């Protein structure tokens, strides 16, 4: 379903229809781009996508819906940079009405009895993809119907997603749960039927929003169970380092095949066990990043901590900025933001977007 060939990924950018996207993206069969795994893995950037799309002659106002979705990615990253590990907990206020810190068994087993949701969970298990609207439905069901705290089910979803981005995932779950927003997000059966083309009736979600606000936890969602999220990293050898050349470090969030390719360098994909212990991902995701890394000429895959790599004495280390690379030492390269001028914490996406809009005009002029 998701190619790992760089030229084909670039073709996917070129094939985006931003108008149709804006009109249909909320539907499970809408014209979504499916570019998120490549953005999350740093193969392509939000700026790259925006520039390519605007170069076709669209104005920023014509495709604002599309540009906003790109902006959400950058916004969440800015929150992560500003708040650090604070995004691992309730960010703005405590999630209300929490009765446990587990995940409903019915969600884990794709057996919630809500057809569209169960189909989405099975697709996640089979492909590593889940439509964004379905992600909201699952989060709403877990947090606001089953009264789970958001973090445990958010970790489960992140584990299985090819586009696993902890900022986007954790902060979206908190937005649904009301710990990073002014109100909770709740979806009823009518909403799900509309956007998923189902026709279910008489489910525990087949109620008005007023009635859902006071619903008792449905029997279908009462059982919970723990789960284990192991990450299986490959067995690797120490890298062969040419001390006469600089060393470029790639990682889970940076697999950019075009990064300073004119410079002859040692190129290392560093997979730190401590990182994956904190942010575990499934075998499919590990296989995905290893295939994506093949787009980078002469890259060596190394499973080690950064300090262990330093012991090999690579010279002139280069890396890209990211909240998870703050312990790296060397020459930090700026990421390819939609606007490098807009940095820092914004309490709401609206505030960020309002400031970003003017900057996007410069992309249109390129």
Image (cartoon, helix red, strand yellow):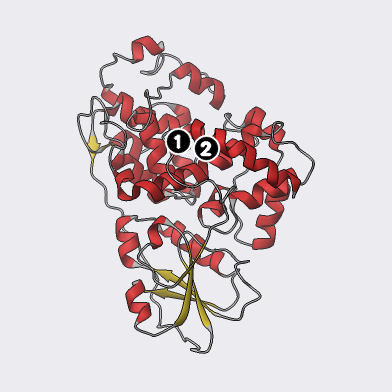
Q: Which mark is residue 135?
A: 1
Rendered view: 230 above or below 309: above
Q: Residue at x 23, y 40 (%)?
A: 225
Dot 1 alpha-carbon crowd within 10 angstroms: few under 14, some 14 to 19, many 20 or more: many
Q: Which mark is residue 46?
A: none
Tally the marks.
2
Please provide percent x and percent y for residue 281. 38, 55
Quadrant for residue 336, please give it.
bottom right
Quadrant for residue 54, please give it.
top right
Task: Look at the image and tell me whether residue 25 can be seen.
Answer: yes
Farthest left residue in view = 99
Quadrant for residue 286, please give it.
bottom left
Rendered view: 54 above or below 4: above
Task: Name the foreground residue: 9 vs 363.
Answer: 363
Task: Name the foreground residue: 15 vs 74.
Answer: 74
Q: Residue at x 48, y 29 (%)?
A: 116
- Helix, strand or loop at label 1? It is helix
Q: Horizontal placement of 118 versus 246: left or right?
A: left
Please provide percent x and percent y for residue 149. 26, 34
Please provide percent x and percent y for residue 77. 45, 48
Dot 2 alpha-carbon crowd within 10 angstroms: few under 14, some 14 to 19, many 20 or more: some
Instruction: Determine contact: label 1, label 2, CB under 8 Å.
Output: yes
- Helix, strand or loop at label 2? It is loop
Q: Which mark is residue 131?
A: 2
Rendered view: 49 above or below 268: above
Q: Residue at x 64, y 62 (%)?
A: 5
Q: Residue at x 60, y 67 (%)?
A: 259
Q: Horizontal placement of 347 versus 308: left or right?
A: right
Q: CA distance from mark 1 to mark 2?
A: 6 Å
Task: Look at the image and tell me whether residue 112 can be seen.
Answer: no
Please provide percent x and percent y for residue 303. 38, 73
Rendered view: 6 above or below 159: below
């Amino acid at each position: 379903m998701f190619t790992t060939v760089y030229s084909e990924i670039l073709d996917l950018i070129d094939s985006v229809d931003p108008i149709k996207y804006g009109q249909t993206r909320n539907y499970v069969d809408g014209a979504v781009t499916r570019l998120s795994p490549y953005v999350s893995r740093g193969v392509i950037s939000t700026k790259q996508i925006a520039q390519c799309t605007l170069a076709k002659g669209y104005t920023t106002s014509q495709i604002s819906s599309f540009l906003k979705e790109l902006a959400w990615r950058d916004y969440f990253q800015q929150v992560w940079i500003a708040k650090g590990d604070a995004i691992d907990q309730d960010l703005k206020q405590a999630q209300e009405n929490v009765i446990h810190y587990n995940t409903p068994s019915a969600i884990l087993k794709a057996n919630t009895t809500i057809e569209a949701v169960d189909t989405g969970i099975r697709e996640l298990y089979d492909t590593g993809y889940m439509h964004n609207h379905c992600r909201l439905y699952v989060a709403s069901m877990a947090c606001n119907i089953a009264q789970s705290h958001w973090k445990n089910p958010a970790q489960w979803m992140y584990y299985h997603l090819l586009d696993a981005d902890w900022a986007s995932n954790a902060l979206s779950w908190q937005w649904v749960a009301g710990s990073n927003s002014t109100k909770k997000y709740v979806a009823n059966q009518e909403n799900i039927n509309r956007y998923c083309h189902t026709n279910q009736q008489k489910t525990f979600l087949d109620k008005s929003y007023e009635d859902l606000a006071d619903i008792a936890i449905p029997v279908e969602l009462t059982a919970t169970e723990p789960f284990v999220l192991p990450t299986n990293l490959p067995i690797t050898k120490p890298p062969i380092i040419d001390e006469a050349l600089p060393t470029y470090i790639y990682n889970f969030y940076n697999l950019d095949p075009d990064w300073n390719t004119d410079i002859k360098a040692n190129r290392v994909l560093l997979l730190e066990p401590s990182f994956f212990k904190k942010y575990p991902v499934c075998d499919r995701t590990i296989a995905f990043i290893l295939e994506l890394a093949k787009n980078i000429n002469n890259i060596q895959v190394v499973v080690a901590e950064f300090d262990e790599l330093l012991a090999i004495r690579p010279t002139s280390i280069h890396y890209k900025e990211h909240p998870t690379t703050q312990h790296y030492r060397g020459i930090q390269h700026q990421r390819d933001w939609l606007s490098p001028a807009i940095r820092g914490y914004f309490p709401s996406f609206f505030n960020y977007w309002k400031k970003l809009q003017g900057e996007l005009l410069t992309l249109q002029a390129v």
